[in-house]
Amino acid sequence: MKHGKKYVDAAKNVDRTKNYDVNEALQLVVDNAKANFDETIEAHIRLGVDSRHADQQVRGAVVLPNGTGKKVRVAVFAKGDQAKAAEEAGADIVGAEELAERIQKENFLDFDVAVAAPNMMGVVGRLGRILGPRGLMPSPKAGTVTPDVAKAVTDAKAGKIEYRLDKSNIIHCPIGKASFGPEKLAENLDTLMEAIVKAKPAAAKGQYIKSSTVTSTMGPGVKFNANKYSDVH
């Protein structure tokens, strides 16, 4: 893959062999975010677990103290009082069977997070094939299947992110925008890393955090030392 001049210039500032201190890594990533839009900063954490085993799954959700910098559109599957509560909490789309039908028939996916009241899971369950691959399926683990739909909407709007392993045992999560600056990004990263460490499965053996990198949308990755978070022995 051929990289542009900005990327090549930025990559010269990064020592690929070095595990930077967290704050230094974030400063570098922010300095290297030179695109003509506010780049998203992401963390990529490789874990020493095997996601093929159910007892080694790492998944959850956490509200970032400084949000993600992204306007989040929230869809809620609810009826009656719960639908009303979701609307009052600022949900963008609220519906029940008719919303599920719209997603199925029109491929309507104009939202970033889906929340469901528990009594709607019979309806939402049928959408697994559409929502699952896009990471939009509500789940109790992520707090998006809940009787308190209003709180789920508020959390999502405030910058709640879900973390989960991909097939390569890596977690990819946004931690904010370049314009946040290193300090706010560090607060968000601390919150995410602490949640991941807390979620360590009992079945995980050996080194839990294998490698950790921060990167901007268009910039090179910068490795950072995660020892301050981890229980690496």
Image (cartoon, rainbow, N blue to C red):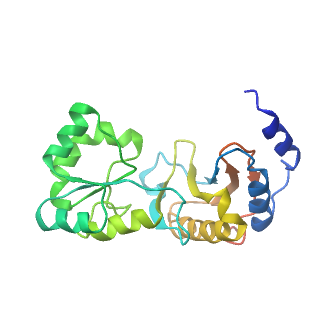
Question: Residue 195 appears at what percent x and percent y?
Answer: 53, 68
Question: Residue 56 appears at what percent x and percent y?
Answer: 48, 55
Q: Is residue 168 above or below residue 177?
A: above
Residue farthest along the top direction in this orientation = 1
Q: Quadrant of residue 231?
A: bottom right
Q: Is residue 193 above or below residue 30?
A: below
Nearer to us in this view, 54 or 139: 139
Question: Residue 5 appears at what percent x and percent y?
Answer: 82, 34
Would residue 167 be found to the left or right of residue 227 on screen? left
Q: Report the label total.
A: 0
Residue farthest along the left direction in this orientation = 80
Nearer to us in this view, 121 or 231: 121
The answer to whether residue 101 shows anywhere in this view is: yes
Residue for point 39% across, 39% down: 133
Residue for point 29% across, 33% down: 107
The answer to whether residue 206 shows anywhere in this view is: no
Q: Quadrant of residue 120?
A: bottom left
Would residue 173 be found to the left or right of residue 79 on screen? right
